[in-house]
């Protein structure tokens, strides 16, 4: 159980999106505008893994309150609060629920600098987050006993205290990657871009190539559909996947992507997303299926 959690930490070391891939020409960016109140979102993640006749399903739900505070020379300054966590884990993982809830407190209040393109550039309250973590870490080490727990918590400590690794982790879909992902300058003529998603197959990351399928544009909204293909998997990663299949008595076979669809609806008045969804499915045709679904939906305009 704890080994799986610890393995997930390693995924943040993977390369993230290269911002230079997003735009191939000049077009004015869709601008963020301030709202009277924070824009509220519901954010749901569902992941399901099938290993022969065994199926594991986890669901995570939360609310995001997003406030565009002000614009500076460096970019756009945002304050983001997360609340109403609800983690529904498979019965085989239920012992992790309490720890996951505790760890969610670390990123419950974030202040970020976001570029004109809509990419997170800096965590402006980074020092406050570290202070919060230091206090929480002491509590966790007292509450959760055992060497594996200690190793896991210390690994998180190392990650959080490396600002670049922490920033890269925030850009993942499971945290803020659905909200800030270069949407402000997306154009139908953009080149395909690579995006790495952590924890795809047995906590291993995979890289996908996203290609814009279509864009519908009117006075109020910009609707974008993106399809994806899977990049070539490194030999070392393939070996780890093969070992994972053998351990679970699944026939060794190449994995392939059966679906990767992202839909984005942007509010042109505020520059905020109205809706962002991503669904993908990977299988090997011999007993393994992995599905993930991310859904960010605006529930209050602000």
Image (spheres, rainbow, N blue to C red):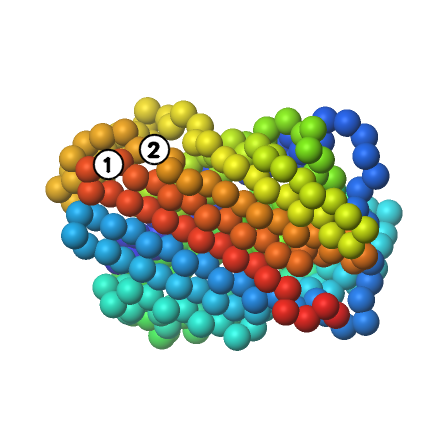
In the image, 167: left or right of 238? right
Q: Can residue 78 be seen in this view?
A: yes
Give the camera-side residue of 267 and 18.
267
Q: Quadrant of the C terminus?
A: bottom right
Q: Who is closer to the viewer here, 231 or 16?
A: 231
User: How far across and down, in percent of the image, does residue 93 sit?
Assistant: 28, 64
User: Mark 1: few, some, or many residues within 10 Å (few <14, many ≥20)?
Assistant: some
Closest to the observer, 6 or 230: 230
The residue carrying mark 1 is 285
Circle 1/circle 2 CB separation < 8 Å: yes
**Residue 276 x %, y %:** 59, 53
Can residue 141 be seen by looking at this rendering?
no
Marks 1/2: CA–CA distance: 9 Å
| Quarter of the picture holding the N terminus | bottom left
Question: Does residue 272 sit above or below 184 in this rendering?
Answer: below
* Label 1 or label 2, whichever comes before in sequence order: 2
Residue occupied by mark 2: 256
Residue at 20% across, 42% down: 287
Q: Quadrant of residue 179?
A: bottom right
Q: Could you say where residue 68 lies in the image, as x and y percent from the top left?
A: 77, 61
**Direction from residue 148 to residue 216 in the image, left or right:** right
Quadrant in the rendering for residue 35: bottom right
Q: What residue occupies the far right of the structure in this picture?
A: 73
């Amino acid at each position: 159980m704890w080994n799986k959690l610890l393995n997930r930490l390693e995924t943040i070391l993977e390369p993230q999106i290269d911002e230079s891939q997003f735009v191939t020409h000049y077009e004015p960016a869709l601008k963020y505008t301030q709202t009277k109140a924070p824009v509220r979102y519901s954010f749901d993640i569902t992941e399901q893994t099938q290993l022969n006749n065994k199926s594991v399903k986890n669901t995570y739900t939360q609310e995001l309150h997003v406030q565009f505070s002000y614009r500076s020379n460096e970019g756009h300054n945002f304050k983001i609060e997360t609340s109403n966590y609800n983690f529904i884990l498979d019965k085989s993982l239920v012992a992790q629920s309490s720890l996951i809830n505790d760890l969610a407190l670390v990123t419950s209040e974030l202040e970020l600098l976001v570029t004109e393109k809509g990419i997170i550039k800096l965590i402006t309250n980074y020092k406050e987050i570290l202070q919060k973590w230091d206090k929480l870490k002491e509590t966790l080490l007292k509450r959760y006993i055992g060497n594996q727990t200690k190793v896991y918590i210390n690994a998180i400590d190392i990650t959080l205290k490396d600002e670049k690794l922490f920033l890269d982790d925030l850009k993942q879909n499971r945290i803020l990657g659905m909200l800030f992902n270069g949407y402000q300058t997306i154009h139908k003529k953009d080149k395909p871009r690579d995006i790495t998603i952590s924890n795809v197959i047995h906590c291993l990351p995979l890289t996908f190539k996203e290609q814009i399928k279509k864009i519908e544009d009117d006075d109020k909204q910009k609707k974008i559909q993106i399809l994806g293909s899977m990049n070539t998997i490194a030999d070392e990663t393939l070996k780890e996947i093969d070992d994972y299949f053998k351990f679970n008595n699944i026939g060794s076979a190449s994995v392939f992507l059966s679906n990767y669809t992202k839909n984005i609806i942007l509010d042109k008045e505020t520059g905020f997303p109205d809706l962002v969804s991503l669904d993908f499915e990977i299988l090997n045709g011999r007993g393994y299926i992995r599905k993930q679904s991310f859904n960010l939906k605006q529930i209050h305009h602000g």
